[in-house]
Image: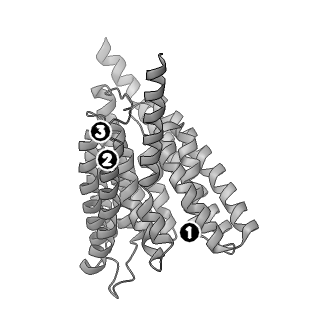
Amino acid sequence: MGVNSMRTSSTSMVRWVSGLLLCFVPMVCLYLSAWSSYAPFIYLGLLPALVALERGMRVAAATAVVTPISVFLGLVVSGSAWISAVFVAAICVGVAWSYTKGWQGAATYIASQGALAAIAAPGARLTDSAPNSLASAAVVTGFVLVGGAWVVLMGILLLDDLPHKDHERPADEDLRRFTIMLICLVFFGTLAAKLWLPGGHAWWVVLTILVVLQPGIAGTSRRTFHRVLGTVAGGLVAAVLVNIIGINSVTTAIGVCVAVLSGIAYLKAPYWVFAALLTAALMCLSFTPETVMHGYAERAGFTLLAAAATVLVLKVSDMALRPVEKIENR
């Protein structure tokens, strides 16, 4: 590589890192303001659009629009467990289809934000309305839209030539099996989170299913290991930090910094690193020293539960289909 090429590569890397850091400016500004409680809503829109940058600006722009729609609809239907389950399962049809285009990263996080809205139903303090009211849903959706739109703007200005990851299209048979299992697991996972599992953290059951289930056993097993490792390790480190530091403003600042690093890690680091940083960020931002260990136990427990259920269903379905495949191949 020549000197000019090395300089060009170094300049591009500095610009990319600067652009990725600037994507988080609205979230950081909100955390430093009197409106700090709305910063997580910015992140709901920011993360899917950031993930979508790996597939190009058009995908990122579409993601920035679809994510707030998903959140709005999730909030509106959140009052009914059955409708919520149908809604989240319906989104998963889009997730499965996205694998044919290589857009599954963005689609998965669009679905996860819609699932969060449907299950945990975060509300807006600007209104006195219930979280599933049109007024509250509109306020939350507005912040989500700002987060995604800001990422697209930074993408246009600084990240339009960001290197893209290669994605292989799954075999049709694997994709059909994946679609059926994803819809069923998410449907029953949402029902369980709404009807039987305690608290809004039960959303992690559906989130785990969405991010670990892949077309094929090998991919699912690998992603499950990475997700469990990242969640358990990252959550534990965050829980210890929150307990030792004991000052909410300091742990919140750490959480914001780690959230920024998680966005960069998704594009540049192994998946378990991203999972660890994302979990640590959410733990630092969500809990106090009095609540952090209980919150960690819930999140780690729900992640392990969903991961085990996903792998079990996948292996059972594989064992059941083997005799059929042998007959067809004769």
- Nearer the viewer's eye, disc 1 or disc 3? 3
* Amino acid on which the number 3 mark rests in the picture: Gly
Q: Which residue is mark 2?
A: 157
Q: Residue at x 30, y 53 (%)?
A: 153
Which quadrant of the structure image shows residue 86?
bottom left
The answer to which of 306 and 246 lies nearer the viewer is 246
Disc with the residue nearer the chain's start (1 vs 3): 3
Three-letter amino acid code of the residue under disc 1: Ser
Q: Nearer the viewer, mark 3 or mark 2?
A: 2
Residue 120 x, y percent position in the rendering: 42, 69
Disc number placed over residue 300 in the picture, else none: none
- Residue at position x 28%, y 52% in the image: 91
Gap in Å between the C-alphas at discs 3 and 2? 13 Å
Q: What's the residue type where badge 2 is placed?
A: Leu
Q: Seen from this angle, which residue lies furthest right?
A: 244
* Residue at point 29%, 41% (across, down): 96
